């Protein structure tokens, strides 16, 4: 019971780790929320606000997060998508753009499926969870330019196809985009597939024959200051386009131009849990792993990044954080751990927590991937 009380205090706030009274904004395409447009809601939101986004198609307008911290999380079953060239045939992708994030600010994106997520000139911390293409072949491309700390977990990234970049053209086809492009940035990636976009087909005309575009890389690392740490990830280059003169080349799985790649050597412990939950409900955390292992739940109100040896991992929580030992993983290999969430304090509409598991098993002591939970008032 002591463990449960300690975790509850962490999730909802305590004198040592207070909850913060940020506003909650509901975004729903059917008009039942505060905004029908995610782009408009993001502009209107104040620093630190939580945006609950109901599943739906939010069109091709661009979502801009400029110089402020936000939590944007899918609320409910289904897909939060932006309609881009895969469904419309146009050449304007749906975008989420994060830029000029100051140090000490955080952006959390969970469960969003847009064609491109672009981050630039960010000194704060960014967490992207459960990002994936909303249909087979649809892009979900991510790029980081001069960003200090980006973490991507449980996602399926795919570069934009050359046809979608160029709209199709005569003669030489356009190259496909990279699934993840890192330029002079520090990025940590967990349990994520990265696939390059396909090259565009070249088309002959009376003035010459066409050359197919090259496939994009699964991962592109540019700049000597770039550092990419990765665990449980796959990298696949896109297919080259066809052409009458010559076909495009397949994209490389990894294109590293002077950066640093660090494979993390920890074991992979599958972790699942809701990204958002209402007060008064039960939060269930499922942990897969070696039977008999006792995981410890680390919980904090803010993100951080401390790079430990590759066999130990990366600490993503800011001190002070709590350490609570859970029950041993049973013989089934899956521990389901339930936490009853009580009501939030008066005047508090939301509470956000970043969590990691610390594992101590016969193979060593290490950290798992981070994961987050947003608790909101049951009135939303």
Image: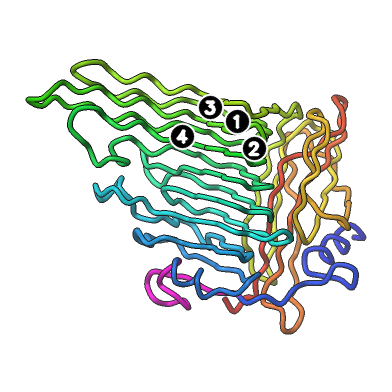
Judge left or right: residue 138 versus residue 117.
left
Question: Which image quadrant: the N terminus?
Answer: bottom right
Outermost residue toward the right in this view:
2
Are the two marked residues, 2 and 4, in contact with CB atoms closer than 8 angstroms? no
Question: Which image quadrant: the C terminus?
Answer: bottom right
Are the two marked residues, 2 and 1, in contact with CB atoms closer than 8 angstroms? yes
Q: Which mark is residue 235?
A: 3
Relative image position of residue 109 (x, y in whole percent): 58, 56
Are the two marked residues, 3 and 1, in contact with CB atoms closer than 8 angstroms? yes
Q: Give the Cα separation between the discs numbered 3 and 1.
A: 7 Å
Q: Secondary structure at mark 3?
A: strand
Provide the major secondary structure of the magenta segment.
Answer: loop
Relative image position of residue 182 (x, y in whole percent): 57, 38
Q: Give the Cα separation between the discs numbered 2 and 4.
A: 17 Å
Q: Which mark is residue 369?
A: none
Q: Give the Cα separation between the discs numbered 2 and 1.
A: 6 Å
State the residue position of label 4. Answer: 178
State the residue position of label 2. Answer: 190
Depth-wise, is mark 2 or mark 4 nearer the camera? 4
Judge left or right: residue 356 versus residue 135.
right
């Amino acid at each position: 019971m002591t463990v449960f009380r300690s975790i509850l205090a962490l999730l909802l706030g305590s004198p040592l780790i207070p909850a913060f009274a940020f506003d909650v904004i509901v975004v729903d395409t059917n008009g039942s929320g505060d905004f029908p447009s995610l782009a408009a809601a993001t502009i209107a939101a104040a620093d630190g606000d939580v945006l609950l986004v109901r599943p739906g198609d939010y069109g091709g307008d661009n979502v801009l997060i400029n110089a402020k911290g936000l939590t944007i999380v899918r609320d409910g079953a289904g897909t939060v998508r932006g309609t881009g060239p895969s469904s419309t045939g146009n050449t304007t992708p749906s975008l989420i753009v994060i830029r000029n994030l100051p140090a000490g600010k955080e952006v959390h994106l969970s469960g969003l499926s847009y064609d491109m997520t672009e981050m630039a000139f960010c000194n704060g911390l960014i967490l992207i969870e459960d990002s994936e293409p909303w249909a087979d072949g649809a892009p979900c491309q991510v790029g980081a330019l001069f960003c200090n700390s980006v973490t991507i977990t449980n996602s399926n990234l795919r570069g934009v196809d050359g046809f979608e970049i160029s709209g199709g053209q005569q003669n030489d086809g356009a190259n496909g985009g990279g699934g993840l492009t890192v330029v002079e940035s520090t990025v940590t990636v967990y349990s994520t597939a990265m696939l390059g976009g396909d090259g565009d087909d070249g088309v002959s005309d009376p003035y010459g024959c066409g050359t197919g575009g090259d496939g994009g890389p699964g991962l592109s690392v540019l700049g000597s200051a770039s550092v990419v740490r990765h665990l449980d990830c796959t990298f696949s280059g896109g297919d080259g386009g066809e052409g009458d003169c010559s076909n495009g080349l397949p994209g490389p799985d990894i294109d590293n131009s002077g950066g640093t790649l660090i494979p993390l050597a920890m074991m992979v412990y599958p972790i699942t849990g809701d990204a958002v939950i209402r007060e008064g409900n039960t939060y269930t955390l499922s942990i897969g792993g070696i039977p008999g292992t006792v995981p410890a739940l680390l919980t904090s109100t803010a993100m951080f990044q401390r790079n430990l040896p590759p066999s130990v991992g990366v600490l993503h929580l800011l001190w002070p954080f709590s350490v609570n030992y859970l029950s041993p993983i049973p013989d089934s290999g899956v521990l389901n751990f339930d936490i009853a969430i009580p009501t939030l304090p008066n005047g508090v509409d939301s509470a956000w927590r970043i969590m990691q598991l610390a594992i101590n098993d016969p193979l060593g002591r290490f950290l798992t991937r981070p994961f987050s939970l947003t608790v909101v008032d049951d009135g939303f």
